[in-house]
Image: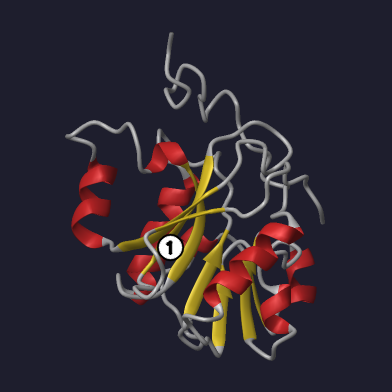
Amino acid sequence: MAIPYTIKNNNYNKNTKDSTIYTPERVSVYLFNLLQHHINPCVLLDPAIGKGSLTNIWRSRTCKIIGVDISRVGSDHCDTFIHGKFENIHAWSYESPDLILCNPPFNGAKGKKLYSEVFLRKMVDLFGPKVPIAMFAPMGMRLNVRAESKRWEWMRDTLDITSIVSLPIDCFGLKFHTEILIFNVPTLKPHYFLYEQSSCSTEG
């Protein structure tokens, strides 16, 4: 019997996560409550802001939000809006973020790359490997990769995963193995489970 995390049971190319599914509000609130005691950002970047599901609660606490999205709906949910694909930004002419929150599309990148990898590489290219990041990613981004994998080598040698939040498989209203990777927030515990026992139904 195949283990549940193999590509056979969780093929990210065939069983894609719809890019228009937003982060459930209760998950955004949980992440806010988790991070606010460990980091106090003045400027926050969401490179796939959508309807501001991840950042609205931070904005209500007077944090300045910079948002990037291919949809203009994001312009209503941030202080500075950049219309276009985040991966196409080659130079940053705005304020540098104190924290990056991101729930990128998991599918649609060129070749075999995951969009979460594309976004993460762009974050590091623009802001360096030490910027605090909390990013939703398919578990296959970090697990079950070959020893010669370029992604595995890059993540191992470049990044500092300081905490992981395990999410229920049905967190987005469909079965998809997802986790939150947190980089460069060393005062957090190494691992958390989302506190809810029930399914995280999709909202927003």
Residue with the mark numbered 1: 182
Residue 154 vertical placement versus 172 (above, below): below
Q: Position of residue 164 (x, y in %)?
A: 43, 55
Residue at x-position 43% and y-position 13%: 2
**Residue 110 appears anywhere in the view:** no
Q: Secondary structure at mark 1?
A: strand
Identify the image quadrant of the N terminus. Answer: top left
Label 1 crowd bin: few (<14), some (14–19), many (20+), radius 10 Å: many
The residue that appears at 72% across and 53% down in the rendered structure is: 22
Snapshot quadrant of residue 197? top right
Where is 130 relative to 73, above or below? below
Instruction: From the viewer's perspective, tell me whether residue 151 is left or right of residue 112.
Output: left
Q: In the displayed structure, does residue 51 sit left or right of residue 46?
A: right
Q: What residue do we see at 78% from left, 45% from top?
A: 201
Tell me: residue 79, above or below residue 134: below
The C terminus: image quadrant: bottom right
Q: x, y (%) of residue 33?
A: 62, 73
Q: Which kind of residue does numbered mark 1 sit on?
A: Ile
Res. 17 image quadrant = top right
Q: Position of residue 124 (x, y in %)?
A: 35, 67
The residue depicted at 31 percent of the width and 74 percent of the height is 130
Residue 133 seen in the figure: yes
Closest to the observer, 107 or 70: 107
Q: Residue furthest top?
A: 1
Front residue of 68 and 59: 59
Foreground residue, 21 or 5?
A: 5
What x and y, as percent, mark residue 156? 22, 52
Q: Is residue 127 above or below residue 134?
A: below
